[in-house]
Amino acid sequence: MTTYNIVTIDGDGIGPEVCQSAVQVLREACGADLLRFTAHDGGATHYQKTGQVLPPDTYEACRTSHAMLHGAAGLPGVTYPDGTEVGNDLHLQLRFKLDLFANVRPIRLYKGVKSPLSDWKAGQIDYVIVRENTEGLYASRGAGVVLRNELATDSLVITRKGVERVAKFALDLSRQRNGAPRDGKKRMTVCDKANILRSYAFFRAVCQEVAQGYPDVEMDYAYADAITVHMLKKPDFYDVIVAENMFGDIISDLGAGTVGGLGIAASAELGLAHGLFQGAHGSAPDIAGQDLASPLATILSGALMLRWLGNRHGDAALTSAADRVEKAVEDMLEKGDAVPHDQGGTARCSEVTAAVCKRLR
Ligand code: ATP
């Protein structure tokens, strides 16, 4: 039996609570020997102590691991002289250095979770946002220009290679899924502002080219502003949405809001050789250290990690553990064993974790 080496980075704010919760659940699902967790430093708090947000030994451990599980990074007051937050550099550096080009963010309404969209039930909202993760507007992080204290610029970077691979990833993902809840059609929606900027028109054109090899996947196009309305009014229409980095960042928080909020929104950042898994939320300093955070986003990201590892290594023990973790969360929510604070309940992070573990047992 292979033992998979998982690097964990607790990070900042609620990061340690939710990361340790996910480790507990994954151990329960996989037994003692399948996964070997090794904790490493990183994040804004570590930067305050050492001046390093991603220490070299953490990076090396990440590079040589089977997968990375992360809590959250970033603290509002911990910034570089240019005003940008230090903590984000933990995952931004990992994204760029390990080429984690596809950020997969499932938007799925679970039974037992109340959506703020009153007309929709579990099963009717079930799509995935694939956010391009290494280019777009965030590619110029650290290289923007502020001139004479009068004007500021950052560059939007779109390359053929970057769009081709993320479009292919999204189309392949659509092929593996059951289509949009509305009509069962496999569909890729390209989210851009092709009507305004050349870079986005290029993004759309390259997506169109790649899609020609996928006649079984219907193509759909939406401007980034209009899609925010569509995601509220016809969420069942979507199967897979592919978007430039910043648009993907923004619309995935909106999508999360429609299915219970950031506390339940999972995320996987994938390249050809590496995978980083963390909830779609940040470090939520307002509720940190109080056992109030929902660990479900990180637990469900852990399930994505098990499935990704299982598919990659052809290991059915991992894919079946992924299914069991998702089922345990779903059953736990449906029966209301432990309803987290952000879902209107009173269960603490530790109680939600214990309830998921109990379901797994
Ligand atoms: P970032 O930009 O780093 O993603 P953010 O500014 O989007 O961070 P978050 O840290 O994600 O902010 O959190 C926004 C708010 O959502 C928090 O203040 C918190 O109230 C709530 N929140 C986020 N994650 C959770 C969670 N796991 N459980 C409960 N509430 C959460």
Image: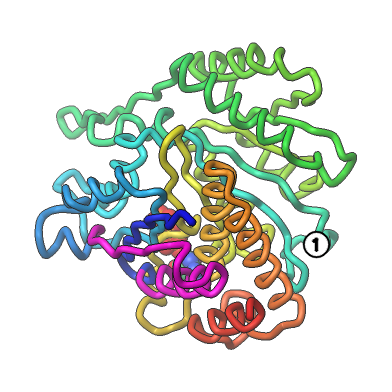
The answer to whether any part of residue 266 appears in the image is yes
Magenta stretch: give its range: 16-43
Instruction: Residue at 71%, 13% (x, y): give it.
Output: 212
Q: How far from the left and from the top, in percent, is residue 316?
A: 63, 53
Q: Quadrant of residue 43?
A: bottom left
- Total numbered circles: 1
- From the viewer's perspective, is 231 left or right of 296? right
Instruction: Residue at 33%, 35% (x, y): give it.
Output: 96
The answer to whether any part of residue 223 appears in the image is no
> Please, is residue 264 above or below residue 131 in the view?
below
Q: Quadrant of residue 76?
A: bottom left
- From the viewer's perspective, is 111 left or right of 5? right
Q: Is mark 1 within 8 Å of ligand 1?
A: no
**In what quadrant of the picture does the C terminus appear?**
bottom right
24 or 185: nearer the eye? Answer: 24
151 or 212: nearer the eye? Answer: 212
> Please, is residue 46 above or below residue 129 in the view?
below
The reply to whether the magenta stretch includes residue 30 is: yes
Q: How far from the left and from the top, in percent, is residue 207?
A: 62, 19
2 or 346: nearer the eye? Answer: 2
Instruction: Residue at 84%, 46% (x, y): give it.
Output: 181
Residue marked by disc 1? 122
Instruction: Residue at 51%, 18% (x, y): give it.
Output: 197
- From the viewer's perspective, is 18 left or right of 139? right
Q: How far from the left and from the top, in percent, is residue 352?
A: 56, 81
Q: Quadrant of residue 228?
A: top right
Q: What SS does tag 1 mark?
A: loop
The reply to whether the magenta stretch includes residue 347 is: no
